[in-house]
Amino acid sequence: MSNESLANLLKEERRFAPPADLAANANVTAEAYEQAAADRLGFWAEQARRLSWAKEPTKTLDWSNPPFAKWFEDGQLNVAYNCVDRHVEAGNGDRVAIHFEGEPGDSRSITYAELKDEVSRAANALLELGVRKGDRVAIYMPMIPETAIAMLASARIGAAHSVVFGGFSADALATRIKDADAKVVITADGGYRRGQPSALKPAVDDAVAKAAGTVEHVLVVRRTGQDVAFDAERDVWWDELVGRQSAEHTPEAFDAEHPLFILYTSGTTGKPKGILHTSGGYLTQTAYTHWAVFDLKPETDVYWCTADVGWVTGHSYIVYGPLANGATQVMYEGTPDTPHQGRFWEIVEKYRVSILYTAPTAIRTFMKWGDDIPAQFDLTSLRVLGSVGEPINPEAWVWYRKNIGADRTPVVDTWWQTETGAMMISPLPGVTETKPGSAQRPLPGISATVVDDEANEVPDGGGGYLVLTEPWPSMLRTIWGDDQRFLDTYWSRFEGKYFAGDGAKKDDDGDIWLLGRVDDVMLVSGHNISTTEVESALVSHPAVAEAAVVGAADDTTGQAIVAFVILRGSAAEDEKLVAELRDHVGATLGPIAKPKRVLPVAELPKTRSGKIMRRLLRDVAENRQLGDVTTLTDSTVMTLIQSKLPSSS
Ligand code: WT7
């Protein structure tokens, strides 16, 4: 991919200054960038002091054996103590930690004092089941407070957790249990999904049998009350075992580099990678970024991250970052359209949510449902809006700010990965003049840039690959059990630099724009064009709600651009509109980016974390047999799409 041919087409000129009142009282000012640039390690050593250490670290970074980093190596701490007990000791035990909102409408609020008791009881229960420091605990749960409690209880006794998203199959769970050699699985009878109880326990029974031998006990939370098979030797009910434990548990301090959790990346190809995160550095960066990027005021803010705890966003920005900061947050069990399409906004109104963190896929869905839905609710409590998970199209960004944020709240587009553990590139709400569609600038203490094929940094205005050029506290330490794969995947493409796998460009101000995974860049007549930019151009047309673009093999141009679009309710699907959409892309990005075909469809294939599976659309566009569809939320979507296509192009 050469600089000048890499996609650099989109021109987005809209700018939004930070609100004056927010800027005047912001947690972080522009000075933080200077301070961190002058002394990066000193900056992180200072951030580590946000935590309560049983033994203060004297060393910040050991990078003597790169890329195997050690942060705050001689420090000792207990992560659960930092997330729970210390807030109670500081006199904030009555503050609500979690406002839980169940899908069927049940709700409960848990204070920090109550959370401390519950986490202590659960820690004692795990000890009774024989779990010890250094063991692994698998967690396969719905979005309920016990999920966070289970994670914190594992952390409290020094066992690493491996949370497996509750929507994954028994096979996926079995592979992960086996790879991590988990001793105990924590699950529930089921959870609520789209108005129905949805079982979890049968998948655990199946997975434990398949994983053959490693699991000694299964701890089962009663959530739905549905019937489950029960193995009297192996299975225990949470309410019975945890319920009878003492609420006293003295946390032990562990080394800063003690494993905290393993989280498997969904990975579109190959065996899932067990990303390993450790304690002190991870908690330092999740706490700092949650406080800085959301301008968190723990005494007054109500924070809500809509992700599932099964993804890294839930680990870092539902459990560890917010709780380390003593924040009050909302946790919601269900889907955004149950029982109605205003459910999210009803929750924002009910709890007076002030900081909302969600994903572009959700935002585009809300756009499709219509502006009139959020308009029915009081959203005036909101003051900062966040986005994460994939590049956000400028139109979706502007819609979010206007319709959810009353054209007043900053939008922070946060780039990071399971592997980075915490946010890396993002605007700061009290500092940055934001640009719709750009994550903009590495956070203080983070070094990121864009390089070309030869690892040379591209000048402003150039495009290439996103790399991280210095180690950061919450970086993955390795792939569980596979150091070689860790080296090959992230550290071998560019000598001494972390390869993120994302295409990116720098604009004329040096701000960074993410262009999607490099596998999603198309090569058309010798030009590299990013799927993200063509999709954003399509979404900027009033008839289009959502778009997914792929490069399909083409005899004349190498690859041809094929676009799948979901139209907005009122748009008529006809040849005239298709021609208009092609022209619109041509006019926005230039004739080279004009799609060869535009196909209106009812749905797009997405993974359970909301990422579009372009690989499958490429199969369709090239008239191939479909590849693996097991990680799709809904595999019937592909049948629908295929039925719309002419049998040959
Ligand atoms: C990939 C990481 C980070 C938590 C959720 C996803 C894409 C993520 C952005 C953003 C553009 C983004 C990248 C990245 N991504 N956030 N703000 N702008 N792209 O974690 O499943 O590990 O996926 O998500 O492609 O590499 P993940």
Image (cartoon, rainbow, N blue to C red):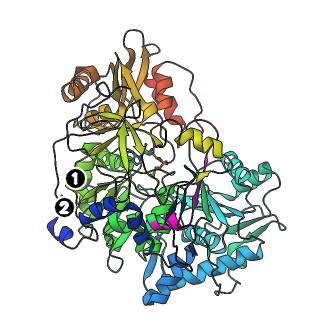
Q: Does the residue labelled 1 lie within 8 Å of ligand 1?
A: no
Mark 1 Cα shell of 10 Å, populated few (<14), some (14-19), many (≥20): many
The secondary structure type at the circle numbered 1 is loop
Q: In which quarter of the image is the N terminus?
A: top left
At 58% from the left and 38% from the top, the residue drawn is: 488
Against 373, residue 550 (above or below) is above
In the image, the segment drawn in magenta is 268-284
Q: Evaluate whether residue 400 shows in this view.
A: yes
The secondary structure type at the circle numbered 2 is loop
The amino acid type, in three-letter code, at marker 2 is Pro
Against 557, residue 183 (above or below) is below
Q: Is residue 296 left or right of residue 115?
A: left
> Which residue bears the numbered disc 2?
18
Q: Where is residue 480 in the image (x, y as percent from the top left)?
A: 65, 51
Q: Which corner quadrant of the image does residue 586 belong to? A: top left
Does 303 appear in magenta?
Answer: no
At 45% from the left and 71% from the top, the residue drawn is: 48
Q: Position of residue 114 (x, y in %)?
A: 53, 84
Assess whether mark 1 and mark 2 are in contact (beta carbons under 8 angstroms): yes
The amino acid type, in three-letter code, at marker 1 is Thr
At 61% from the left and 46% from the top, the residue drawn is: 273
Residue 496: mark: none
Residue 434: mark: 1
Q: Which residue lies furthest to the top in this view?
A: 556
Mark 2 Cα shell of 10 Å, populated few (<14), some (14-19), many (≥20): many
Choose between 476 and 514: the one closer to the eye.
Answer: 476
